[in-house]
Amino acid sequence: MAKDNIYVPTPAKIIDYVIESGDTFSIKLDVKMEHDPGQFVMCSIPGIGESAISICSFSRDYLELNIREVGNVTNAISRLKKDDSLLIRGPYGHGYPMDDFKDNSIVIIGGGSGVAPLKGIIEYVDTRRSDFKYIDIFIGYRTPEDILFKKQLKSWKTNHKVHLSVDKNPNKTKFDGKVGFVTELLKQSDFDNKGRIAVICGPPIMIKFVVGILKDKGFNEDQIFVSAERMMQCGVGFCGHCMINGKYCCKDGPVFRYDEIKDLPEK
Amino acid sequence: MSNYVLQKEEFSAFFSQVSENYDFIAPIKGKETSFEKVTNDDMLNLIEWDELPLFPIKHFFQPKDEPIFKYDKTTAKDVNSKPRKTVLFGLRLCDLNAIHHRDMALMNEDFTDPFYKERRENSILIGLHCKKGDEYCFCGDMDLHDFFDLMLYEHDECFIIETKTDKGLKFAKKITALDRTDKAIHANDRITENNTRIDKEKMNKIADFFTSEKWEEGSKLCLSCTACNMLCPSCYCFEFTDEPELVLLHKGQRMRNISSCQLKCFTRVAGDFVFRKEKNDRFKHRIYHQLQYFKEKHGVTLCVGCGRCIRGCPKRIDWVDILNKM
């Protein structure tokens, strides 16, 4: 009897390849996979290894991944071209509980590569716009050259309120946003917690400050959702690498309601 | 369920009947005692009946290295695995409970480890009642329970065998060296001496000690050698590595290797960020996973109190002692 080997990935063909910035690119895969925004897939390049990559799209027809070249696997994926294949398995983890967000306004706060999984939320909302109220998008990057999803940004601006900032602009590049930390933009905006959910994805230091600002604005901890990042190997809660004080980032997360993890010393 | 009896002089007959259909694994004395496949009658004399083997049984369920699939350029193919029917003999209650905990960890309602499941389904667990612990044992503190297919209790010239599962009963019925008996297992038979040493109150409050500096008494001695993880019957963490063929580099297999939370690379992500950089954090993580985190998820501690992590530690770091002094 053949066993059900959950570790065996299946080939996925690249149908589009977009360079987003100096070290970041997006690939669209010819894969039909039911998933929630915020879930991830394990991507393999045989002989190199496997990496967890968050899904940055929301479509039943394809899967889009936004990848930064930081390690062996992501470097190897960056060398692939349109029509090449890689191996994937998933989707894994708990994404954003979109059903629970229904009839609320959503504040989306992302930094750098952390914008990728949040793009999935925006695309989800756009497929059922009437289910949600206002969408405020706060995104920050290091420099204008690092801005991701430039193509999508236009339509986001048409449909939602977008606040874009870059930490610095050394090359004096023209861009439609402000120079400064994204946390400043968030601080200046005037909304409260009534009927609102906040979702955050970005570097840990940004998450820390953003949570503080949101609390000042009256948000309760159960209205804030954060996405965590850890080393992941199996994706199914066995291998132990992604454990944060007993919570498996891959299986219990990567999206956590803030009150679920706020007391974990290793968060 | 019914009890059986095995005369000690019949043990060789028992072994030969079992080994007709099963691999027979038992604790075999060597430089250190470890679980080995018994291949002939002579090896029966090397079975360790009294002391806890230093090495645990876990490698039979989760080998140090094993292929999980074969790849060729951009295809991946499952490996053919046909686990042999295996009798694991001479397991102490600590080892048996560690298997139970591994079942909880690796076979849950969401996911099942396919390799582990196959091996578990093909194995029969035969326990051997442990009469006395040594200075490192604390299984008596750990709420272990009867988890086995068969359990042997030594009586003068024979073993009285308790059957616990249908699988065990079916097995016992087939082996003619085992006879049905009306003899019962008495409370006295179940006693294990000298098997408590952890302060249970402290153990149950371990979450309160997370920031205690006392842990450093242990971690400053720690060599990060990973012996504690390797000898632990419960530790199950692993990692994947790709192993290309030497000539055809595009072909190869993905291996699953046993892994250790005591190593810095355990939490290292691309970009060289390490989440548990300090040795003290890694030292604590193992203990907290064993005593707190696993219990939060599964209701029991992952630790079974066998004491191997202390017995086999080259620096004899006694974390139980550190906890007791909190």
Image (cartoon, rainbow, N blue to C red):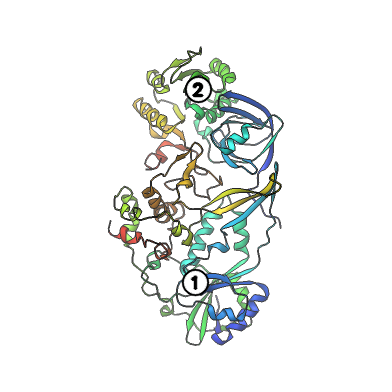
Q: Residues within 10 Å of mark 1 (few under 14, many from 20)?
A: some
> Is B215 in front, or is B15?
B215
- Is residue A102 something that shows in the picture? no
> Is B182 in front, or is B280?
B280
User: Is B111 placed left or right of A206 in the picture?
Assistant: right
Q: Quadrant of the C terminus of chain B?
A: bottom left
Quadrant for residue B10, please give it: bottom right
Q: Amino acid at mark 2?
A: Lys
Kindly identify which chain the residue marked by label 2 belongs to.
A
Residue in the picture at 39% in, 42% down? A266
* Callout 1 secondary element: loop
Instruction: State if disc 1 and disc 2 touch (CB < 8 Å).
Output: no
Which residue corresponds to mark 2? A133
Q: Amino acid at mark 1?
A: Thr
Residue B297: % across, % down: 46, 51
User: Relative to residue A230, is residue B303 depicted above or below?
Assistant: below
Residue B152: % across, % down: 51, 77
Residue A258: % across, % down: 42, 36
Which residue corresponds to mark 1? B33
User: Is B232 placed left or right of B321 in the picture?
Assistant: right
Pick out the residue farthest to the left.
B325
Tell me, for residue B184, which label it has, or none: none
- Is residue A91 something that shows in the picture? yes
Q: Residues within 10 Å of mark 2 (few under 14, many from 20)?
A: some
Label 2 vs label 1: CA separation?
Answer: 67 Å
Instruction: Give the foreground label among 2 and 1.
Output: 1
Respond whether the residues carrying marks 2 and 1 are from the same subunit.
Answer: no
> Is A148 in front, or is B123?
A148
* Callout 2 secondary element: loop
Quadrant for residue A57, please give it: top right
